[in-house]
Amino acid sequence: MFAIAAPRSPSRKKLLALLLGISLATPPVWAETVTVRVAVVGGLVLCDVWPRLAKKAEQALGLRVETVAASPKEGVVPAFATGQADLLLIHGSDAANALLAAGIAAPLRAWALNEHVIVGPPDDPAKVREAPNGAEAVRRIAASGASFVAFRDPGSHAVVSALWRSAGIRPGQWVIPDTSDTAQGILGLAAEKGAYTVVGHIPVAFGKMPAAGSEVLLNGDPEMRRVYVVIEPGPRHPATAEQRAAARELADYLLSPVGQADLRTVDREAGGPWIYTLP
């Protein structure tokens, strides 16, 4: 009769090797998730595109995205410059270039676009509603003798100047200076004067600029879009090496095919088009 041998226990060396392999294959549960602190121009939050995209980025990268500031550039640029934020999303502008020149920002990278629209009186004496694009619209305004308020916002001014150049027209007496007390008062002034003006679509659509007495008459012209840039820490920014690496990872995602596709998705979910991907 044969005796059944008891199963041999693994040697201590083999057991230690097995446990070590398991520990190396399993991420440590105590490791903290890295946080990227982001400052964004307010319209990105107002239209709800950025909060949705930040969640997509967290899922894609395993990072925590914390929006520490959302306001006009006068608020978010200092937040980035003083190290309160590791990544900045604003329009390409003199303010963005100044950060680069000061060594606070790394080279700027284009990320997305928003659009400007023509707002004017509901009776639309210049027939802007029927214009195929912004250049033809401002040509009609000038030819009709209707009034146009030149909004002093730098972004709107840049868009309007480009339209005038495209239309081959020069501003004349039909152009009224912006005398409103605040940026939000521009449409009230335009309504009071029965005039047209050019403003960002998002603040009008979401009530940031009260539009009583005025209507959006033309939108959807690609020539009336402005570029957003993503700004990472430059050599004189106080971010740590870990913060810089996390900011770069998030920036690369935003510019990647996956990030651009996610932007299209969340913009649609937010009721857009509000924010456009790169061409």
Image (cartoon, rainbow, N blue to C red):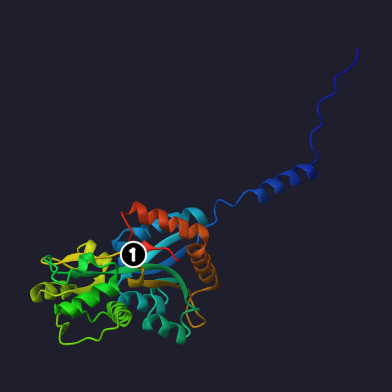
* SS label for mark 1: helix
Is residue 261 visible in this depiction of the protein?
A: yes
Q: Which of 17/228 is in front?
A: 228
For badge 1, the amino acid type reads Leu
* Residue 278 x/y as whole percent: 45, 66
Quarter of the image with the C terminus in it: bottom left
Q: Position of residue 86 (x, y in %)?
A: 45, 71
Depth check: 167 or 220 in front?
167
Note whether 60 is above or below 81 in the view shown.
above
Which residue is located at x 21 percent, y 79 percent? 151
Q: Residue at image x 38%, y 54%?
A: 266
Q: At 11% across and 72% down in the image, what residue appears? A: 191
Q: Residue 209's spot in the image, x, y percent? A: 19, 68
Direction from residue 121 to residue 248 in the image, left or right: right
* Left or right of 5 in this view: 60: left
Give whichever of 158, 63 is nearer the camera: 158
- Dot 1 corresponds to which residue? 44
Q: Is residue 166 left or right of residue 181?
A: right
